[in-house]
Image (cartoon, grey):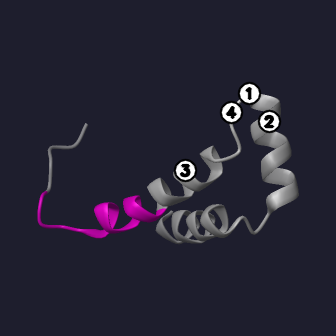
Amino acid sequence: MVLFLLFDGIGGVTHRHRQTGVALIKHLGYPVYFLSIAGIAKLLSVPAIQQSKYITSGE
C-alpha cells in the first residue's frame, strides 16, 4: 500500500500520466491543479503510515 501511494504520488506531482489523469479530473469536474494537490497529499501520507511512534487504537 505504501509503495502504491509513493509511486502514485510521484506520478501525480510530476504529471506522469497527464492525458489520462487530466481527462478523468475534468470529467469529474475538478480543476487540473487538483492532481498536484492529491499527489502531494499521497507523498505526505507515506511517512505518516510508516511511523510507529504515535500508535492510535484500532477499530
**Tag 2: Cα neighbours inside 10 Å, few (<14), some, or many (≥20)?**
few
- Identify which residue, 32 or 6, lies in the foreground: 32
The CA span between labels 2 and 3 is 14 Å
Kindly check if marks 2 and 3 are in contact, taking CB atoms under 8 A apart as contact: no
Query: Is residue 23 depicted above or below 45 in this figure?
Result: above
Q: Looking at the image, tell me whether mark 2 or mark 3 is earlier in sequence order.
A: 2
Quadrant in the picture for residue 28: top right
Kindly check if marks 3 and 1 are in contact, taking CB atoms under 8 A apart as contact: no
The CA span between labels 1 and 4 is 4 Å
Residue type at tag 3: Ala
Where is mark 1, residue-wise?
A: 29
Q: Looking at the image, tell me whether mark 3 or mark 4 is earlier in sequence order.
A: 4
The CA span between labels 4 and 2 is 6 Å
Where is mark 2, residue-wise?
A: 26
Q: Looking at the image, tell me whether mark 3 or mark 1 is earlier in sequence order.
A: 1
Kindly check if marks 1 and 4 are in contact, taking CB atoms under 8 A apart as contact: yes
The magenta segment:
43-54
Q: Is residue 51 magenta?
A: yes
Where is mark 3, residue-wise?
A: 38
Secondary-structure class at tag 2: helix
Secondary-structure class at tag 1: loop
The CA span between labels 1 and 2 is 5 Å
Kindly check if marks 1 and 2 are in contact, taking CB atoms under 8 A apart as contact: yes
Residue type at tag 4: Tyr
The residue shown at (72%, 64%) is 15
Residue type at tag 2: Lys
Secondary-structure class at tag 3: helix
